[in-house]
């Protein structure tokens, strides 16, 4: 990997992002936050965010196996509940968005049915937030080795 000579984003620019983060943390169940953060970061290949969210999920009692399953959920969809699959499908659709048909009505209606109207909108905000963080992390080349408490697993060195 090339050395990172990119200047960090000024801290004041993070204020709106931290507001979004606070909104999500107070409205989205921690397990669903882990699902969304791990899956979107895996799709986007944000090594910094993956390391952080693997570490955080492990701190909350998630096994390495469970983390791996979330990151690659389409390989074993049956191990997830209907609610979890809907959240993961929405994460995939929003993360890979390319026009209105990217998030079909059937998917959105299912997410609303399973998570409620407010729950669906809050999941959407969680997905938007992690995608924004991924784009910052990738573009500024944040170094996952700079995170405290990460393991070789968190860094993808297993």
Image: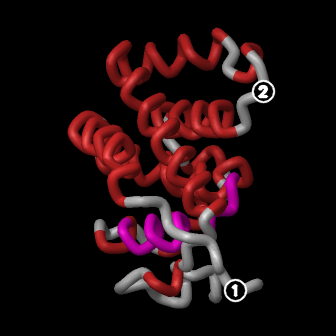
User: To which quarter of the image does residue 93 belong?
Assistant: top right
Q: Which residue is mark 2?
A: 98
> Is residue 95 among the parts visible in the rendering?
yes
x 31%, y 47%: residue: 15
Badge 2 element: loop
Quadrant position of the C terminus in the picture: bottom right
> Is residue 65 among the parts visible in the rendering?
no
Q: In the rendered view, would you say 25 is above or below 41?
A: above
Q: Position of residue 59 (x, y in %)?
A: 31, 73
Q: In the rendered view, would you say 107 is above or below 122?
A: above
Residues tagged 1 and 2 counted as in contact (Cβ below 8 A): no
Q: Earlier in the sequence, mark 1 or mark 2?
A: 1
x 69%, y 62%: residue: 45
Q: Which residue is mark 1?
A: 3
Badge 1 element: loop
**Mark drawn on residue 90:** none
Circle nearer the viewer, 1 or 2: 1
Kindly give the residue lying farthest to the left in the view shown.
26
- Is residue 67 found left or right of 123 in the rendered image? right
Residue stretch in magenta: 43-56
Q: Position of residue 1 (x, y in %)?
A: 76, 84
**Mark 1 and mark 2: Cα distance apart in space:** 32 Å
x 56%, y 62%: residue: 137
Q: How many residues crowd mark 2 within 10 Å: few (<14), some (14–19), many (20+)?
A: few
Q: Position of residue 62 (x, y in %)?
A: 39, 67
Q: Position of residue 141 (x, y in %)?
A: 62, 70
Magenta part, dominant SS: helix
User: To which quarter of the image does residue 28 belong?
Assistant: top left
């Amino acid at each position: 990997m090339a050395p990172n000579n990119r200047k960090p984003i000024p801290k004041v620019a993070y204020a709106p992002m931290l507001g979004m983060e606070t909104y999500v943390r107070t409205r989205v169940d921690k397990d669903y936050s882990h699902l969304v953060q791990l899956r979107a970061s895996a799709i986007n290949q944000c090594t910094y965010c993956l390391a952080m969210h693997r570490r955080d999920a492990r701190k909350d009692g998630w096994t390495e196996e469970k983390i791996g399953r979330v990151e690659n959920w389409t390989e074993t969809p049956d191990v997830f509940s209907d609610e979890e699959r809907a959240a993961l499908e929405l994460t995939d659709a929003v993360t890979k968005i390319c026009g209105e048909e990217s998030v079909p009505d059937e998917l959105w209606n299912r997410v609303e049915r399973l998570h409620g109207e407010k729950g669906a909108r809050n999941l959407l905000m969680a997905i938007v937030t992690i995608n924004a963080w991924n784009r910052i992390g990738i573009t500024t080349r944040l170094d996952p080795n700079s995170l405290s408490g990460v393991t070789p697993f968190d860094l993808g060195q297993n």
